[in-house]
Image (tube, rainbow, N blue to C red):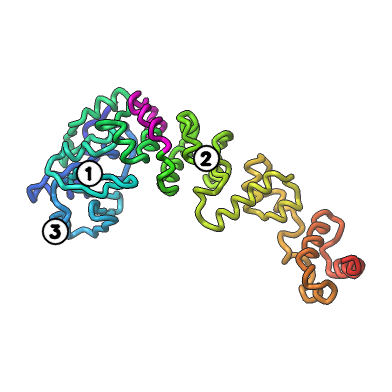
């Protein structure tokens, strides 16, 4: 099941960085997700490295590399083939709003591994391809089980995002969640409300990609995540999935996206006929077409006009006949009649029609 001949697969730049840190007398390992995924034959280009070298020392050792620092505890190196994040061994002392606000650097790999979430994420690899398993993560990997490192209740309380991570790993890897960890998830699931929508969205989208939103319903997380999971339908367009499950636009951030989402919900309640496709436009109509399993693209392409600007009349002509306050109403009226075939998109016919009705406006 497991391939432990990492030496032949390791990214050469990663190997070089590990050896460079070792050369200066410090420990350095690949840790966590990459090692786990490689053992499971899952491709990955994201490498988390851990070391007992202090960040200031790392800067000097790796001064030939372009290093970005999203925060002081993590250094990031982006190569052509891999993203490499490097952290110094540490012990997290105090958590506040899922962030360790107080920590201390330590010199022990085992101490650093104790702060991590699940045992399957504690496997390490040195520069020569040797596997280091201080937390018995390999046993859990073989037994297909997700267990927390240390007390599961403390881990879930420290960072409720771990609830979603445990469930996501369970769904993606087809692993069981340890019974004690399940109890901890149930106890602290209400704390999901304290997390940012962005962080929750990142985890939820990974479940959308593998079509496993049902697992959130199974653990009764829908209310705490403020999602409607009573009707789960998957579409190629992930935004459309969000439209169906995020009724209050909690996870849809951009103003334009919120507007589109609301229009989709409005049009979904209506008949997807020629006029409504014209009124709501191609993008919104296509999304609703997917919801209703109707080819809205064909409806749109066959419309005689696509917008008011296609109506064969000049705005100045309209203003000479119709009061300004009624211009939008008249455009809508003309569009409906042209689309329904009651009026040809011809300037003379349109002008004649307007003159006939101007006294009724």
Q: Give me the residue at 18% from left, 33% from top.
A: 131
Q: Is residue 55 left or right of residue 267?
A: left
Earlier residue among tags 1 and 3 = 3
Task: Tell me where residue 109 sits by quadrant.
Answer: top left
> Who is closer to the viewer here, 249 or 13?
249
Earlier residue among tags 2 and 1 = 1
Q: Is residue 140 left or right of residue 187?
A: left
Task: Tell me where residue 148 sits by quadrant.
Answer: top left
Magenta-colored span? 168-190
Residue 198 picture location, percent across and down: 43, 49
Earlier residue among tags 2 and 3 = 3
Res 227 label: 2
Q: Is residue 196 above or below residue 315?
A: above
Q: Give me the residue at 19% from left, 38% from top.
A: 125
Res 92 label: 1
Residue wearing tag 3: 60
Residue that sits furthest to the left in the current view: 25
Res 2 label: none
Residue 58 picture location, percent across and down: 16, 54
């Amino acid at each position: 099941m497991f391939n432990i001949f990492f030496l032949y697969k390791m990214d050469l730049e990663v190997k070089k960085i590990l050896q460079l840190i070792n050369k200066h007398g410090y420990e350095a390992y690949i840790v966590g997700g990459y090692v786990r995924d490689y053992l499971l034959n899952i491709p990955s280009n994201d490498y988390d490295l851990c070391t007992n070298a202090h960040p200031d020392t790392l800067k000097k050792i790796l001064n030939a590399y372009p290093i970005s620092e999203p925060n002081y505890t993590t250094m990031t190196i982006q190569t052509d083939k891999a993203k490499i994040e490097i952290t110094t061994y540490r012990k997290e002392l105090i958590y506040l709003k899922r962030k360790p606000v107080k920590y201390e650097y330590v010199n022990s790999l085992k101490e650093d591994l104790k702060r991590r979430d699940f045992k399957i994420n504690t496997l390490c690899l040195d520069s020569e391809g040797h596997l280091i398993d201080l937390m018995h993560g390999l046993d859990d990997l073989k037994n297909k089980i997700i267990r927390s490192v240390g007390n599961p209740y403390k881990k879930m309380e420290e960072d409720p995002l771990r609830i979603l991570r445990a469930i996501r790993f369970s769904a993606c890897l087809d692993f069981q969640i340890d019974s004690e960890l399940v109890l901890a998830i149930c106890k602290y699931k209400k704390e999901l409300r304290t997390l940012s929508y962005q962080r929750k969205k990142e985890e939820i989208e990974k479940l959308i990609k593998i079509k496993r939103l049902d697992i959130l319903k199974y653990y009764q997380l829908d209310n705490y995540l403020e999602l409607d999971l009573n009707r789960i339908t998957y579409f190629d367009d992930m935004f459309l999935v969000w439209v169906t499950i995020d009724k209050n636009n909690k996870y849809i951030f951009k103003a334009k996206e919120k507007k589109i989402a609301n229009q989709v919900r409005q049009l979904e309640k209506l008949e997807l006929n020629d006029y409504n496709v014209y009124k709501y436009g191609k993008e919104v109509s296509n999304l609703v077409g997917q919801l209703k399993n109707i080819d809205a693209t064909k409806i749109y392409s066959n419309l005689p006009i696509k917008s008011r600007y296609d109506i064969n009349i000049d705005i100045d002509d309209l203003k000479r006949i119709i009061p300004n306050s009624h211009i939008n109403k008249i455009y809508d009226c003309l569009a409906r009649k042209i689309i329904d075939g009651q009026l040809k998109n011809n300037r003379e016919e349109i002008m004649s029609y307007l003159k006939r009705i101007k006294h009724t406006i």
